[in-house]
Amino acid sequence: MTELFISVDIGTTNTKGALMDAGGRLLSSHSIGHLVQSPQPGWAEHDMEQNWWLDAVRIIRRLMEDSGVRPEGVRSIMVSGMCPSIGLTDEEGRPLRNGITQSDIREPEHTLFDFGVTPWDHCEKSTYIIPRLLWVRENEPEEYGKVRKLFYAHSYLYYRLTGCYAIDFNTACWVTPLFNPQKKEFDPQVLAAIGLGLCELPQVKSPVDANCFLSEDAAELTGLTTNTRVCVGTGDFYESLMAAGVRGRGDGMLYFGSVGMYFGMAEDLSVFLKKPTMMGLPKDPIEMGPAFPVSGILLEWFRAEFAKAESVQAQNDRKNFFAWMDEKAARLPIGADRLIFLPHLNGERNPTKDPHARGVLYGLRLDHSVTHVYRAIMESYCYSVRQAMEEMVKNGEVTPVHRISVSGGGAKSALWRQITSDVLGVETIYNPCGEETLAGCYLAAMGAGYFSDLDPFYQQWLQSGTIKTVPIPANEELYDKTYGMYRRIYGCLSGTYQGLEALPGK
């Protein structure tokens, strides 16, 4: 019987899955989109039951139906998800409120210092999830008082699949100092200090620990068997790094997902399977560069809100909307014909932490079209990356960028990859087969004992066909000028956005 492996990844805007065999052959893949709920500006939430559980169930069933394979052949499942995120439940694992995603930027009035707790050194990173937890304590005390279990998106899926309450030691770092990375365990005293003394503490395991199996209920819902193992799982950026071909010291990756991130390697990537990786601290094995609340989602937002007619036209022409728009935008001059966009629609994280920052379209004329705005959005993300990277390199937080892998949905665009190379002045590497779920299926196989290290993944599973994009010198010169204007506009508006709150609206 063919040995089969499933990977399920819960992202910000969709959940996706893949079914592969032990040779790395893709047998089926599927994704389901879901909306990020934003009842207030800066909030970003998911329905835990629908988005973190039932979407995964639907995907697994679809993978099995499309492939036609026998359920008995599926040996293991790897789960992963956006990181960080936070889900609060009662003792039975019933959600008490929506899950809070990595894009959320709400801030509490209090800090850990107010509870006699010293924050982790990473607390200035806006991806740190503790402030969102304290916000719930302040604003939803009734629900907070009922919290008995803490989850991330993928650990909630793991719990629903197996009934086992566990978390991988990498993801747990995002709630330090509630979690002690040196001891690899949660600290009951810190939890009690912030009013979570009645919480059950999850077991802390390796991402590829697969000692739990599908429960009878989960097996019935998914169409699999109770002999299927489930790996504890991890944050999806580790899989993204693997799938992008990043491995050794000096490699880097720019992620064009719903949230934009840059990661650099100080050690071999396999370190994340062996010990907690506390990204963003000095001497960390994985350098955490700038983070951006929105990146690839910018174009999804633009299509949904402002390019409905173009979407219909592309559909009538039987073309992918983004490929169709790329063709049109590629014919425009660099700088989108003197149109500049500031992409901080959901606040800013780097180089300035400003939850009040908003998007700005500068230089708009009557002869500018939807296509001009589309290209300006693409360019703006690259400007914001360059600005943030320049600041972090100057401060010694990350090493200089010489070559980076690009990953995520936005990296599929040849135009966006060329703009990235030209604006940053670096060679970019893209692997079209580099989906997180490719790496996830390999990790599922590791959990089931089919592989002992990552060598076969890079040597066999990660297919050839890498696309290299190099900067065009003439374009670099032009982008230096438009980038300079971007910096001037940014400087003039920085710190002014809070004034918008005095105006009518929500």
Image (cartoon, grey):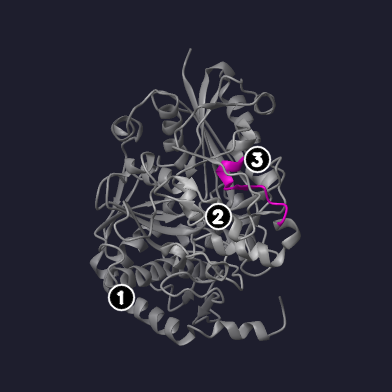
Task: Compare residues 134 and 62 and report the one nearer the observer.
Answer: 134
Quadrant location, the C terminus: bottom right
The residue indicated by pointer 3 is 53
Helix, strand or loop at label 1? It is helix
Measured along the vertical axis of the image, is residue 480 above or below residue 50?
Answer: below
The residue indicated by pointer 1 is 480
Q: Spatial distance from mark 3 to mark 1, Cα to Cα?
A: 46 Å
Measured along the vertical axis of the image, is residue 267 above or below residue 64?
Answer: below
Type of the residue with mark 3: Trp
- Magenta stretch bounds: 145-156
Q: Is residue 309 left or right of residue 322?
A: right
Residue 172 is covered by the magenta coloring = no
Does label 3 or label 1 sit earlier along the sequence? 3
Question: In the image, which is nearer the foreground, mark 3 or mark 1?
Answer: 3
Residue 102: x %, y % from top left: 54, 57
Helix, strand or loop at label 3? It is helix
Type of the residue with mark 2: Gln
Q: Spatial distance from mark 2 to mark 1, Cα to Cα?
A: 52 Å
Which residue is found at the position 41% from the left and 31% from the top?
Answer: 442
The local crowd at label 1, few if under 14, some if 14 to 19, many if 20 or more residues have their Cα within 10 Å, is: some
